[in-house]
Image (cartoon, rainbow, N blue to C red):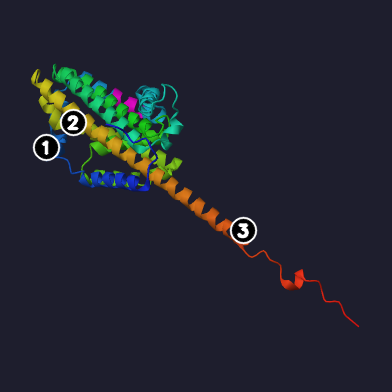
């Protein structure tokens, strides 16, 4: 399939924005059994080995470190940039993150589809392997799945030209993660918070959002409850593990893809508006000059003709 590498048109961007908005409207509530996630976890907490609880505590600490300074979950931007460069027919290492904003949206969309497909495939195998041991491998699965979730959203960020090294972007990434595991009310609230994100957030707002990150993790963990209940059964857990991890990463990747795509579209449209406004201003400012240049340059007759000489 040939990718359009020409300049984005306003009609195309508006169509893409409409598709994203329709996707947002289609985000349904959690399934009934997903809402019951807290109940199975109340049971699981009693039978889960201490090692699992230690791992969960460690993941909480690591997630806090990720928000503050990136921690061990930060990714390298170069592999994603090289994928974009490949689509453009450019050599590896030739593309800088700052250039991505001006690359046509179809190219970026193609790269993010590839990212999503690769991570969903990896998560499926990962879930099957950690499902072999049931409850005993659950301790390994939770940080692995969280790490994969953070990685895929960060790659979506880079693919649309945003830098995960920026704390503001890491807040956005965590909210994408929260969006994927929230109920209908939670999703509406997050969309409202993110609606003006492309205009930037203040330091005070960022600090306020950081304070709520533990709730994000617990909501994310609670959604394991009902689904992971079946994974504690050895062997049977292979099937459930593969399905759970596949669906989880697919939802997370799609949330990151669509929410970052929306930001890039809005910024491209704003840039178009600013350019159009500048051109209009320039046209207005040059109109008087143009009129003078094209007007009647003849001098009035009383200035061309010498004054009549008095005769005796």
Q: Residue at x 38, y 42 (%)?
A: 8
Q: Is residue 140 left or right of residue 303?
A: left
Secondary structure beneath dot 2 equals helix
- Which of pointers 1 and 3 indicates the residue nearer the eye? 3
Q: Is residue 174 left or right of residue 228?
A: right
Tell me the quadrant of the picture where the C terminus can be found: bottom right
Q: Is residue 60 magenta?
A: yes
* Residue that extends furthest to the bottom in the rendered view of this protein: 312
Q: Is residue 50 magenta?
A: no
Q: Please tell me which of labels 2 and 1 falls first in the chain.
A: 1
Q: Please tell me which of labels 3 and 2 falls first in the chain.
A: 2
Q: Where's residue 262, x and y in %? A: 33, 42
Q: Nearer the viewer, residue 303 or 38?
A: 303
Q: Is residue 99 left or right of residue 156?
A: right
Q: Is residue 116 left or right of residue 105?
A: left
- What residue does disc 3 label? 289
Rendered image quadrant of residue 296: bottom right
- What residue does disc 2 label? 247
Tell me the quadrant of the picture where the N terminus can be found: top left
Q: Residues within 10 Å of mark 1 (few under 14, many from 20)?
A: few
- Whole-Å distance between the Cαs marked 2 and 1? 15 Å
Quick check: can you spot residue 173?
no
């Amino acid at each position: 399939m040939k990718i359009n590498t020409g300049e984005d048109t306003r009609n195309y961007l508006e169509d893409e924005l409409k598709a994203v908005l329709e996707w947002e409207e289609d985000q349904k509530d959690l399934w009934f059994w997903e809402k019951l996630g807290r109940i199975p976890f109340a049971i699981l907490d009693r039978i889960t080995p201490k090692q699992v609880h230690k791992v969960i505590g460690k993941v909480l600490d690591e997630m806090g470190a990720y928000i503050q300074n990136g921690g061990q979950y930060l990714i390298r931007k170069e592999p994603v940039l090289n994928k974009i460069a490949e689509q453009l027919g450019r050599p590896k290492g030739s593309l800088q993150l700052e250039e991505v904003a001006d690359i046509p949206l179809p190219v970026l969309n193609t790269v993010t589809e590839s990212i999503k497909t690769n991570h969903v495939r990896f998560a499926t195998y990962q879930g099957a392997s950690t499902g072999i041991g049931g409850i005993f491998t659950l301790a390994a699965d939770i940080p692995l799945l969280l790490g994969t979730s953070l990685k895929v959203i960060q790659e979506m960020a880079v693919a649309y030209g945003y830098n995960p090294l920026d704390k503001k972007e890491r807040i956005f990434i965590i909210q994408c993660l929260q969006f994927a595991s929230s109920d209908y009310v939670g999703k509406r609230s997050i969309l409202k918070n993110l609606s003006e994100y492309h205009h930037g957030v203040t330091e005070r707002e960022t600090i306020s959002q950081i304070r709520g990150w533990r709730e994000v993790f617990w909501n994310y963990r609670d959604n394991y409850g009902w689904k992971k209940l079946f994974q504690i059964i050895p062997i049977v857990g292979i099937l459930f593990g593969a399905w759970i991890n596949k669906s989880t990463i697919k939802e997370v990747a799609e949330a990151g893809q669509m929410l970052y795509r929306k930001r890039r579209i809005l910024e491209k449209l704003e840039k178009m508006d600013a350019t159009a406004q500048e051109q209009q201003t320039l046209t207005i400012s040059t109109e008087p000059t143009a009129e003078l240049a094209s007007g009647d340059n003849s001098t009035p007759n009383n200035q061309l003709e010498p004054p009549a000489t008095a005769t005796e």
